[in-house]
Every structure is written in structure tokens, then in C-alpha cells.
Image (cartoon, rainbow, N blue to C red):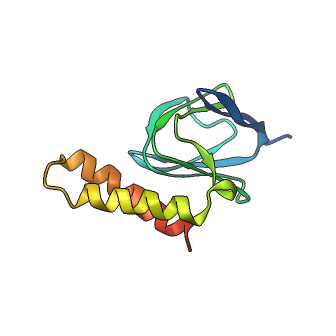
């Protein structure tokens, strides 16, 4: 029996990834979620982190939405990027910007929560 399901990762200007996979791990506000075939229907929001597909494809996201139903996973994000194509200079700039914002007293706890995940993920990518 085939254990695969369909996935599409889409940004506003283009499709990022499409195919049939066995597993995806997504960074949700509720925590990391692993999606397998026949997962219960799901609609949720992405937080900064890595979308990992079958342990060999990784995509950095800062925000977006996820919908899973009828063995179709749809990820919509304005910030999705394949980590293979993010250079160290860009990571360093993004880290610097996030660290400056988080040190400000002018941001909410929610913004600090999101920025902490962004910094943690960018530091993980830059290793």
C-alpha cells in the first residue's frame, strides 16, 4: 500500500515545491507537527522555522498557513525559501535585524516569541 501524499509549497509569485512524499515536519505555533498519510484534517499557522520534507529537503519560513485534508498538504507562505539557496551573508543580515528588534523595548511578547524562533532557526541554518 502506497504511504505517500501530495504536497504543494507556494509563495505569492511562484510554486516552490510540489510532489508526493511520505513525511513532512512543519513549524506551527502549537509546536512541530509531523504530517503522514491519512493525518487528521488540519488548518494552522506557521511560525518561523524549517519545513522538513523526508529529511532531505528543508525550507525556511517565517510565516504562512498550512492546510491538510484528503492527503493533500498545502503550505502558503510569503517568506518560504529553500535553505540551499540562502547564503551566509543573507543569514547574517537577517540575524542582525532580528536581534536588534528583539532587544527593543517597543515590541510585544508575541513579537518576541516569533523573533526568538526566527533567531533560533537562522542560527541552526548557519551552522
Q: How many marks?
A: 0
Q: Is residue 80 left or right of residue 93?
A: right
- Residue drawn at 33 percent across, 54 percent down: 115
Query: On screen, 67 above or below 109?
Result: above
Query: On screen, 7 above or below 105?
Result: above
- Residue drawn at 18 percent across, 56 percent down: 104
Farthest residue, direction bottom? 127
Residue 33 seen in this snapshot: yes
- Residue drawn at 61 percent across, 37 percent down: 39
Farthest residue, direction right? 1
Q: Position of residue 7 (x, y in %)?
A: 70, 35
Nearer to the camera, 41 or 1 = 41
Q: Is residue 100 left or right of residue 56?
A: left
Q: Is residue 6 left or right of residue 106?
A: right
Nearer to the camera, 69 or 92 = 92
- Residue drawn at 34 percent across, 50 percent down: 114
Quadrant of the drawing holding the N terminus: top right
Nearer to the camera, 126 or 38 = 126
Q: Position of residue 93 (x, y in %)?
A: 45, 60
Residue 4 seen in this snapshot: no
Quadrant of the drawing holding the C terminus: bottom right
Q: Position of residue 24 (x, y in %)?
A: 64, 47
Nearer to the camera, 26 or 81 = 81
Query: On screen, 111 above or below 124?
Result: above
Q: Position of residue 75 (x, y in %)?
A: 59, 34
Amino acid at each position: 500500500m502506497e504511504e505517500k501524499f501530495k504536497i504543494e509549497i507556494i509563495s505569492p509569485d511562484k510554486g516552490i515545491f510540489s510532489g508526493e512524499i511520505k513525511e513532512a515536519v512543519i513549524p506551527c505555533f502549537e509546536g512541530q507537527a509531523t504530517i503522514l498519510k491519512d493525518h487528521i484534517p488540519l488548518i494552522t499557522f506557521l511560525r518561523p522555522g524549517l519545513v522538513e520534507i523526508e529529511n532531505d529537503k528543508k525550507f525556511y519560513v517565517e510565516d504562512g498557513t498550512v492546510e491538510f485534508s484528503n492527503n493533500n498538504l498545502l503550505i502558503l507562505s510569503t517568506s518560504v525559501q529553500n535553505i540551499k539557496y540562502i547564503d551566509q551573508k543573507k543569514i547574517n543580515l537577517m540575524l542582525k535585524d532580528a536581534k536588534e528588534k528583539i532587544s527593543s523595548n517597543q515590541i510585544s511578547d508575541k513579537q518576541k516569541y516569533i523573533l526568538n524562533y526566527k533567531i533560533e532557526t537562522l542560527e541552526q541554518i548557519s551552522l
